[in-house]
Amino acid sequence: MKKQLVLAFALAALPLTAFAAEPGYTYLEAGYARLNIDVDDVGDADFDGFQVRGSVEAGKDFHFFGSYGSATNDDAGIDLDFSELQLGVGYHYPLSDSTDVLAEIGYLRQELDVDEFGDADADGYRASVGFRSAFNENFEGYVKGSYSGGDFDGFSALVGAQVKFNPTWGLVGELEAGEMGEGVDATKYLIGVRASF
């Protein structure tokens, strides 16, 4: 009788475990960002700063997202400030209880301000496809491939993970590498704290 009772409780808990491992799309996040920009025949520069992001689930399969990041470099004695804004909408479709395939499209704006020389900006869009999977209640990973167009022209790949301390708080790490345009490559590292709702 005790074995049957334990088995019944274990079976009853399975749907809760699967539900707890579903990826969520409503969160706020803030963290440290490092951007390396490598220009052909010129060299590369590292920019250090921050990034804030958020996402809101809209219905069963859609989410709206936004992010803003700012980073600086003054290695040559000149302040270089780089910022990026992204706003968009995403669609996520469950492949299983813990894995979603996702597609996102959004507006992208980047600005580079060079102290005493002026600034330059670029506007365009970014389209991404990828997968997001919660391996258990405390760990999820995601991968995305993106194309940026408009004033931009380049592909990038992103891999990231979140370690969840509880249902609300988690630590996020990310690496994205790719092209910003012809002859310009970028690698971005991010580590931050996420609050999921």
Image: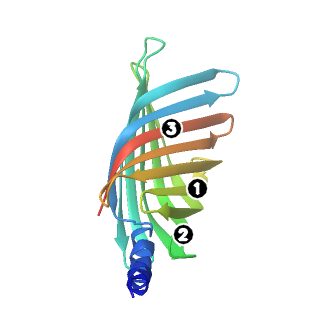
Which circle marks residue 117 in the picture? Answer: none
- Who is closer to the viewer here, 31 or 40? 31
For label 1, the crowd category at 10 Å Cα-Cα, with few meaning under 14, some 14 to 19 and many 20 or more, is many
Tag 2 or tag 3, which sits nearer the N-term?
2
Whether residue 121 can be seen here: yes
Q: CA distance from mark 1 to mark 2?
A: 12 Å
* Point 52% across, 52% down: residue: 124
Q: Which residue is mark 2?
A: 99
Q: Which residue is mark 3?
A: 189
* Point 36% across, 74% down: residue: 58
Residue 113 pos. (x, y %): 42, 29
Tag 2 or tag 1, which sits nearer the N-term?
2
* Point 43% across, 86% down: residue: 4
Residue 2 pos. (x, y %): 38, 83
Q: Quadrant of residue 44?
A: top right
Whether residue 51 can be seen here: no
Q: Decide: marks 1, 3 in contact (CB < 8 A)?
A: no
* Point 69% across, 34% down: residue: 183
Q: Which residue is mark 1?
A: 143
**Which amino acid type is shown beneath numbered disc 2?**
Thr
Q: Quadrant of the N terminus?
A: bottom left
Residue 60 pos. (x, y %): 41, 79
**Which amino acid type is shown beneath numbered disc 1?**
Val
